[in-house]
Every structure is written in structure tokens, then in C-alpha cells.
Amino acid sequence: MVQEAQLIPSIANEIQQIHDTVYKTFKSGVCRPLEYRRVQLLQLARMLQENADAFAEAIHKDLGKPKQEVYGMEIGAIIERSLICADSLEEWSKPQEVKPAEWATSWSPKVLPSPKGPILIISPWNYPLVLSLQSLYAAMAAGCPAVVKPSEFAPAFSETLADFVPKYLDPKAYAVVCGAVPETTKLLELRWAHIFYTGNGRVGRIVAAAAARHLTPVSLELGGKSPVIVAEDYDVKLAAKRILFGKCSNAGQTCVAPDYVLVAKNKRDALVEALAETLQGFYPTGDLNSDSLSHIVSRSHFDRINGALGKTKGKIARGGKSDPQTLKFEITIVSDVDFEDELMKDEIFGPILPIIGVDTMDEAVDYINSRDHPLTLYAFTDDAGLKQKLKDETLSGSLIFNDSLNQLAINETPFGGVGESGYGNQVLKYGFDGFTHFRTTMDVPKEAEPHIWFRYAPYSEESMKI
Ligand code: NAD
């Protein structure tokens, strides 16, 4: 039997001390002034700008992730968003005026955006930087201290983050705790003002249950199978290219990667051919030699993906090979898959794309609705009727027409799941709102007394009439 790792007592003490420090800092009020928040946000951007290479190297070491993907999808996004937060702080945090009924105007009711308190951020390995720091900038903007617990499956990134954070940010307010299950379990025993967890649903339940002991609010950014519909009307070559952008980024280890394709049956073979052709263009010297393709994060994930491929009854139309030494895995297209196939059970979270032919779009919608609500539903179509049907008859974290993954590039929309794909939102103002308590305030003048006399006992016929 494998022995569960125990938490070393000195590390338990260290975690307790970090917790005490961030609570003390919060109580002291230093994180509250906008100027402090602005400085920390600018420092976060500076940390990434000055050490972009070190972060990109570390993530490359963990995942073999091409630097272009790290710069574009992780570092660049967080620098830009930290700067937007710094510029938007004043607007987001100012008291919100409301328009009450005429008789209540003199009470001056308002909404005060108020920092909730210290935030715990638990992040996964697949986009280790963006998923650790997207919540960190939001906590800073909201005036909250925060502790980040990055994933043990991205150790080089985690160490790099733990090294730079105290050099750039206020160490009394922001800390990184490296470690795995024992460290996270200790963190979860403590009280937080909000916990932001990104990862799988099994651990999401552990986090939510631990938080419930303190009535701590939680955001859960989870995963699941994100389907792709390709309708008869759409150009299969363009669909293939755009689907593969989402599937090949980080070798399919993306929460919103296209998981499987439901294609109009009479277009299935053409789509499979277009996918194979596109991949030949992406990786002309072979996927396993390509510097433009990440490897699988660990041997256990590699074995899981290989195991699922070994059990499919579908036909491997392209790819299928992998290298256990380098953990590289070919982008693998499996056609003639049916709904009961092994590949249709769990989130693939890797470079395998099952293709299922459907007779009608109703069949595709019924199948999607028979499963958990996905994090994203993709559909390739220009048919306005089908678009409306998908809006009206399905539910998912997001609904994206005619592209994949690009919803992550938009600053103005929330990112979050629904049902089994999670709850709570992130990105800029949505992240700020998650860590903010919207506190009602009013100030009732003495002069209001003649207008509110009727509420006091003893009640009478006269007071009832008001
Ligand atoms: P992971 O294994 O890195 O785990 C995530 C975090 O949970 C880590 O920090 C880890 O230390 C912690 N953890 C693991 N076991 C724990 C336990 N028993 N108790 C407490 N903490 C524990 O990452 P993962 O879960 O493999 O991530 C992949 C999943 O995350 C996929 O399902 C993916 O779709 C999802 N995901 C979702 C989003 C999103 O924004 N919705 C983003 C990325 C990934």
C-alpha cells in the first residue's frame, strides 16, 4: 500500500505563520488604499516583464511548452490585465450610487465595494502562470492579501514564482506556498475569506467541503468534456484549422480544449481528411520532433491517455504514436467513434480527438444535453437557426461559434463554468467582484423622523394606514 505523504511539522508551522501574517496585514488596513493596490499591480507586471525568460524557461521545463504559447497565452495576458486593473481600480472600487424610491433619497443608500479579506488561490499545472496570477491580480485590485498554492506537477514554475514573489511584492500580504496534497490540506484547514480553486471536480469537492466548515465562499474553475459541433454548412478546412488550434495548444492539456467533435455524417470523412492535412502543415517533420508541441505533463498522465487510446473501438485515422521517454504524444484523430466508446467517458485532457458522425443537429444537441454542462460548447456553423437553437436549448460556461480557445483572449467577458464545470467567474472586473463584498451603506438623517414615526410600537389603526 502506498503511504500517504505526511506534512512535515516545520512546514505546518510555516503555513500557519503565513496565514497569521496575511490576516494581520489585512487587519492593519495597509492593502486597502488604492495607491498600495496600484503599486502591487504594477510590481506584478514588472516581475513578469523583467523575468519573462525565467518563467518561460521554467514552464518549458515542466511541460515542454513552446515559448510562443507561454508568452502569448500566459505572461502577456497577465501583464496586460494587471495594468488594466491598475487603471480601472478607482472606477471599480468607488461607492456605487443607487436611485432609491423618492421617500428614501435622503437616506443616501450606496453600495461600498469592500475587500473580503485574505484569499487562498489553488492552481493547476496546465497553464501554471496564468491560473495562479489571474486570481492574484484580482485579489490585489480588490484590496485583499493572498496566498498562492501552485501545482506540484509544475515544480520549476512553482519554485520560480516562490523565488520572485517576495522580491517584487509586499511579503506581508502576498505569499507562495509550494507543495502537494499535505500542504494544500493544511491550507484548507485554515479560515480564508474566499478560496479560488482551479482543477478537477474530485478535488473541487474536497475544497468546497473544507471551505464549508468555515462558511468560506468558493470559486471552482473545473473542467469536463467541451464538445465541438461541425454543421453541414461550414467549410471543413477552416473548421479543421481552428479546432486544431485549440486541440494542439499545450498538447490538448487545456480546460477548454475541444474534447470531441460531433459532425454532420456526410461531412465526417472530409473533416477527418482536412484535420490530417492541417496537422501535416503544423508539424511537417513529425509531431514527436516538433518544438511547437508540448509534451504530456507526467508519466501518469501519459499512461492514462495511452490507456484510453488503447481501449477505443474507433479507427485511428491520424497519429497514435507516442514516446514514453520524452512524454511527447502525436495529435491523434480517432474516427468512427460511438457514444459508448472509452474516449467518451472522461475528459481527455490530451492530444486525442474523437470524431462522431451524427445524422442531425438535433441528435448532437440531445447528446450534449444528456451529459454534464460543459465548460465550453463550440459550434462551426453560419446557420442562424442552429445558433439560436444552441443558445436556447443548451447550457455551458461559454458558447463559441466558429473558433476555439479565443474566448480566453477577451478581457471584457467572464470566464467560468456552470454545473459540473464549476461556479464563479474570473477575468478583470469579474475577478475583482469575486473577492469584493458589496456592502450596503446608508445614513438616515434625524430629519427623517417625522416620516418614519409609524413603524414604532404600539401599532394602531392610524399607523396601519401609512
Ligand atoms: P492538479 O493535479 O495540478 O491539481 C490542482 C490543484 O489541486 C493543485 O494545486 C494540487 O496540489 C491540488 N490538489 C490535488 N489533490 C488535492 C487534494 N486531495 N486535496 C487538496 N488539494 C489537492 O491539476 P488537475 O486537477 O489535474 O488539473 C486538470 C483539471 O483542471 C482538468 O479537469 C481541467 O479541465 C481543469 N482546469 C480547469 C480550468 C478552468 O479555468 N476551468 C483551468 C485549467 C484546468
Image: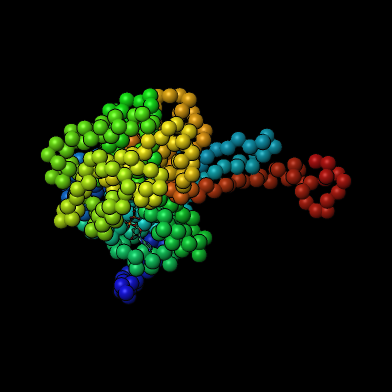
Residue 249 location (% of width, % of height): 26, 42
> Would you say 355 lies left or right of 286 here?
right
Question: In the rendered image, which quarter contains the C terminus?
Answer: top right
Residue 51 location (% of width, % of height): 19, 48
User: Where is 117 relative to 87, above or below?
Assistant: below
Could you say which is closer to the camera, residue 99 or residue 339?
A: 339
Residue 384 location (% of width, % of height): 45, 24
Q: In this rendering, does residue 393 appear at all?
A: yes
Residue 411 location (% of width, % of height): 37, 36
- Location of residue 282 by image quarter: top left
Residue visible at 31% across and 40% down in the picture: 335
Residue visible at 18% across and 35% down in the picture: 280
Question: In the rendered image, which quarter contains the N terminus?
Answer: bottom left
> Would you say 290 lies left or right of 75 here?
left
The coloring applied to the image is rainbow
> Would you say 234 lies left or right of 360 here?
left
- Location of residue 431 by image quarter: top left
User: Where is 378 relative to 304, above or below?
Assistant: above
Could you say which is closer to the camera, residue 39 or residue 1?
A: 1
Q: In this rendering, does residue 141 appear at all?
A: no
Could you say which is closer to the camera, residue 321 or residue 77?
A: 321
Residue visible at 50% across and 50% down in the picture: 437
